[in-house]
Image: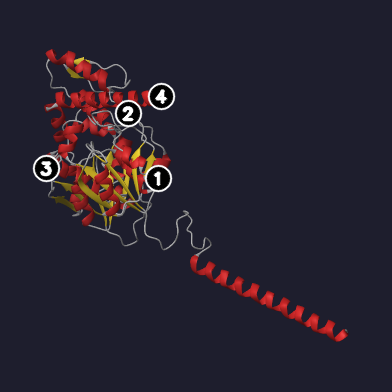
Amino acid sequence: MNKMGGITSSVESYAAVKWVVGVIIVGVSVLGFYSSSGPFGLWGKNGRRRNKKPIRVYMDGCFDMMHYGHCNALRQARALGDQLIVGVVSDDEIIANKGPPVTPLHERLIMVNAVKWVDEVIPEAPYAITEEFMKKLFDEYNIDYIIHGDDPCVLPDGTDAYAHAKKAGRYKQIKRTEGVSSTDIVGRMLLCVRERNIADTHNHSSLQRQFSNGRGQQKFEDGGVVASGTRVSHFLPTSRRIVQFSNGRSPGPDARIVYIDGAFDLFHAGHVEILRLARDRGDFLLVGIHTDQTVSATRGLHRPIMSLHERSLSVLACRYVDEVIIGAPWEVSKDMITTFNISLVVHGTTAENTDFQKEQSNPYAVPISLGIFQILDSPLDITTTTIIRRIVSNHEAYQKRNEKKGESEKKYYESKTHVSGD
């Protein structure tokens, strides 16, 4: 009996030891996996499975007269995946669905490619996501989700341009950036134009009502706008938004820092291309953005169209820019060069003001005297005035374009009302 009890006890002890050893082995294995794969094992902090193909998201748009609202949409879209593919709608599609674009396709492609959150661009994308194009996105471009803002995108017949993507369950939505739109910017440009005769005052007033969006009273002289104090932006800058757009990079101790300054009003393809060239001249590109007061003093009371902080965000979104000075001084001083350790100051050949070297007070006198000033040949002959002239020369077409947009959205909301009523 004692012998049998001893045997039983030995078997139980052996089983217990075996169980403990098994637990230790499993524990060691888990710890080994923990150390090699991190605290989240197969899953990363963002909840995505490790070593899996990247999540590719698609967002399209006209991106006409691209502004910081477009850039913020692309930033939000990129945050929903690992790679952002952007479709840029063709000129013909825009004309058919909205009216003539202000900036042609090749300029819009330059703008979108320069946004730092964009990984790939699909030129001449269709305005509406058809079943055929959606299949192409899924099969050829390996798109996982189609992204759009929470504002309606409606076709001329009043239907939702993203209906197929929603039906397929591959649609995600982001929040629209309030306080800016291409329609609003067009209105600001039309309001700033002074070369109008008295006969145009009535039409100009109707444009004011259409675009002013509660900016307050405007004064007219000879059919033009007395622009001082008339462009009140709805944009309220926050430190969080500026941080979201910033790179967070600092120049290295031996970095060659290149400085370029300007108004960068109505940020366009000409700006992007000169910034690209400037960045190629060094390791770190610092961009000075002049204050609204400085721009008004040098370009006229009707400028700038966009406020200082609006212009700053547009420049910050550019992949060639490392840092900006918000409210940079007009003159580049010795103290400024020393403070920011600037190695080279550059300026483009195409600009609103190309006679600065003839002026009594040359803003680049100091860098010129130090031998660190260089003129760059601008790749594109485009200025802010170029964009404004495009609008003014065809303002009736753009007015009809915005009315057309309003009619389409009205049809969309009416159809939604009928559906919910059923």
Dot 1 alpha-carbon crowd within 10 angstroms: few under 14, some 14 to 19, many 20 or more: few
Q: CA distance from mark 4 to mark 2?
A: 41 Å
Label 1 to label 3: alpha-carbon separation: 32 Å
For marks 4 and 3, the one nearer the N-term is 3
Q: Secondary structure at mark 2?
A: loop
Tell me which residue sits at (13%, 22%) in the image: 195
Within 10 angstroms of label 2, few (less than 14), some, or many (20 or more) residues? some
The reply to whether residue 222 is visible in this rendering is: no
Callout 3: SS: loop
Sequence-wise, which precedes: disc 1 or disc 3?
1
**Residue named by callout 2:** 233
Query: In the rendering, at what x and y percent does residue 141 appear?
Result: 27, 53
**x 38%, y 40%: residue:** 173
Please tell me how crowded label 3 is: few (under 14), some (14-19), or many (20+) other residues with Cα within 10 Å: few
Residue holding disc 1: 243
Against 261, residue 42 (above or below) is below
Is residue 81 shown left or right of residue 25?
left
| Residue linked to disc 4 | 422
Please tell me whether mark 1 sits on a helix, a strand or a loop. helix
Name the amino acid, label 4: Asp
Disc 4 element: loop
Residue 257 against residue 88 in the figure, above or below: below
Left or right of 167: which side holds 356?
Answer: left
Which quadrant holds the N terminus? bottom right
- The three-letter amino acid code for the residue at tag 2 is Ser
Which is nearer the eye, 117 or 367? Answer: 117
Q: Which mark is residue 381?
A: 3
